[in-house]
Amino acid sequence: MTLPEEISVPENPTAPPPPRRSWRPLLMRLHFYAGILVAPFIVIAAVTGGLYAMAPTIERLAYGDLLHVEPSGRPVPLADQAAAARNAYPHLAMTGMRPSAETGESTRIYFADPALDEEFRRAVFVDPYTARVLGDEPTWLGYLPVSTFLDGLHRHLQLGEPGRIYSEVAASWLWVVALGGLCLWLFRRGRVFTVARGLKGRARTLNWHGATGVWLLAGLLFLSATGITWSTYAGAHVSDIRTALNWQRPTMDPAPTSTATVDPADIDYDAVVHAAAGAGVRLPVEVALAPEAGAGVTVTEQDKPYRLTTNAATVDPATGSVTSTLDYWRDYSVVAMLADWGIRAHMGLLFGLLNQLVLLGIAVALVAVIVGGYRMWWLRRPTRGSAWAVGRAPLRGGLRTLSPWAAGALVVTAAALGWFLPLLGIPLAAFVIVDLGIAAIKRGKVGTDA
């Protein structure tokens, strides 16, 4: 039987409409799970990072009796200051010094100490005006014990190498949570940088959560990127790329000097520092004695607020001549410069107290944003039933709302990012596997009940 041409078959009124293509459901579920499960790592990193950012200021207060002296006339020669430290610690071998760079600042004389770990040195503090020994402290890369402790707390929770997993998880996921939150906030098509007035309860918390996150976005992306560069697993990939493209930090190749072996007592340290200054290496500097004969004395610029360079020079202590130099603007690639500035800004060293206060502010605001996220989760809990009930996760199936091309591109991108950032990829794969397992269990339960 054929139908007349003027008669049409009516559409099935009960047929579901085609799915609306949108990234929002997928982003909602990812942001939710990352916020619930990864946010504790980010909170710990924010708290310890905020403390570490203030380490230079804390250090100046905690060690004021060693770092600061009363100016009294002209400083005595650096050789005399070094001799006073060697006389006070005759059983230790001198390895270098950090001369006083400002009025009222002490001089540090460094010694190798067998009682300390290999990476540590004994710093003896000397009054540059009287050559009086003020005391000593163990140092690590120039950091005193308070800074060393806060650095270890932030990097690995004082648990050693295994503890670095926590900080790498935080750095690897921070940018994902931040960008995902930005996209969700823009989907709302409301205020972006301000909080709507008159809101209460969960709506008000959501507004504060979103607007504050937007204001923090640039800082969070910066901290995530710079934190990844010195992480264990992703950091190794970054190092490989920088090495392949010749973007790594350059090192100085000291030319051999005319010196065979020089006793630290025979070196004119003022002449060495003066010669290095002529080559563009300005105070504050660190003077490192040669570990082997004929390598000369290395003078390297140290961190100072608003100083961008880390110039270095090798000086022949016998003749006072500069044998090799490392010029920041000449020898560093642009990427190496950016990486160096980024790391020093991450540590709160590049712009002094202002840098430290900005990092502390970001840390406090980030903790507040995360607390707001947990509060929203709590406010979404069912009002009836178990007292332990919490807010339900956004509906699964977000990947099915994307076009096949978008879904395929997302899977490939996620796999690439997971390889480059292993502590992003492994937790993400675990989320997906657990989520699929829960979905399968629920489907099986529904089928059994039916």
Image (cartoon, helix red, strand yellow):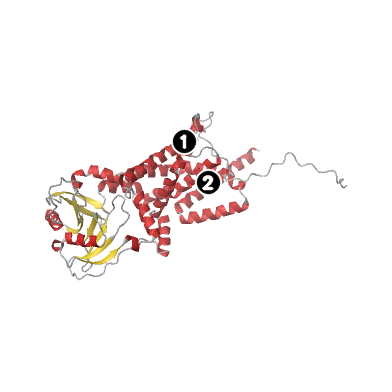
Quadrant housing residue 232: bottom left
Residue under pointer 1: 208
Q: Nearer the viewer, mark 1 or mark 2?
A: 1
Residue 10 is at least partly visible in this image: yes
Q: CA distance from mark 1 to mark 2?
A: 31 Å
Q: How many marks?
A: 2
Q: Considering depth in this image, is 363 or 438 the residue closer to the camera?
A: 363
- Residue 342, given in percent of the width and then of the height, sits at 37, 52
* Vertical placement of residue 58 versus 330, above or below: above
Identify the residue at image location x=24%, y=42%. Answer: 61
Q: Quadrant of residue 212?
A: top left
* Amino acid, disc 1: Trp
- Please tell me the numbered disc located at residue 265: none
Task: Name the residue located 31 percent from the left edge and 56 percent from the top edge.
Answer: 309
Which residue is more in the foreground, 273 or 155?
273
* For residue 149, side relative to residue 361 (left or right): left
Residue 407 point in image, percent of width and height: 59, 51
Q: Residues within 10 Å of mark 2 (few under 14, many from 20)?
A: few
Of residues 428 and 105, the one drawn nearer to the viewer in this rendering: 105
Residue bearing mark 2:
434
Work out whether 237 lies above or below 349.
below
Tag 1–tag 2 contact (CB < 8 Å): no
- How far across and down, in percent of the image, does residue 162 sit? 37, 51
Answer with left or right where residue 107 lies relative to residue 53: left
Dot 1 alpha-carbon crowd within 10 angstroms: few under 14, some 14 to 19, many 20 or more? many
Given residues 14 and 306, the one toward you in this image is: 306
Residue 292 place in picture, x, y as percent? 22, 66
Question: Label 2 is placed on what type of residue?
Answer: Val
| SS label for mark 2 | helix
Which one is earlier in the sequence, the residue at label 1 or at label 2? Answer: 1
